Amino acid sequence: MPRRKKHWLDAIFEFLFGEIAPLARNIFHHTTTYIFIAACIFCAKYVGARLFEPTDKIVSYLHVIDSYGTLLLLAGFSIWITVDIILLIRKHLGDQHDEDEDQDRR
């Protein structure tokens, strides 16, 4: 698998987090992605509220969208980050296991 180029954020993450820098970097990237998605949902709700007259029906729809959208966003974020952490830990442990086997062979 090809290695990716170093980015200026890599040095900051390595300085701050040490060995767990790849995990911290992935969590940072996924968190910023989810913040962007949440901002898009908020903007859609805001625009929807401005486009239509604030009748009881529209207000109730917007409340449902806001409530369930927030819950789904939070649940999706939690699942995404949990899966990411599990995969990175498995990869990290697998890399260490491979290094241990290489040292045992020598």
Image: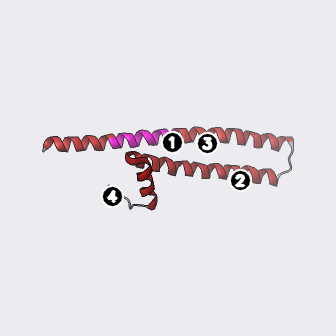
Please report the bounds of the magenta region as a residue range: 79-92
Q: Earlier in the sequence, mark 2 or mark 1?
A: 2
**Residue type, mark 3 in image:** Leu
Helix, strand or loop: magenta stretch: helix
Residue type of the residue flagged with mark 4: Pro
Quadrant of the frame with the N terminus? bottom left
Q: Give the residue type that dot 1 points to.
A: Trp
Mark 1 is surrounded, within 10 Å at the Cα level, by few (under 14), some (14 to 19) or many (20 or more) other residues, namely some
Residue at the farthest front position: 15
Within 10 Å of the Cα at label 4, are there few (<14), some (14-19), or many (20+) other Cα atoms? few
Q: Name the residue under label 3.
A: 73
The residue at which mark 4 appears reads as: 2
Q: Which label belongs to residue 80?
A: 1
Q: Distance between the residues labelled 3 and 2?
A: 15 Å
Report helix, strand or loop for mark 2: helix
| Element type where label 4 sits in the image | loop
**Mark 2 lies on residue:** 43
| Residue 78 image point, x, y percent | 54, 38
- Amino acid bearing label 2: Cys
Q: In which quarter of the image is the C terminus?
A: top left
Give above or below for 32 relative to 76.
below
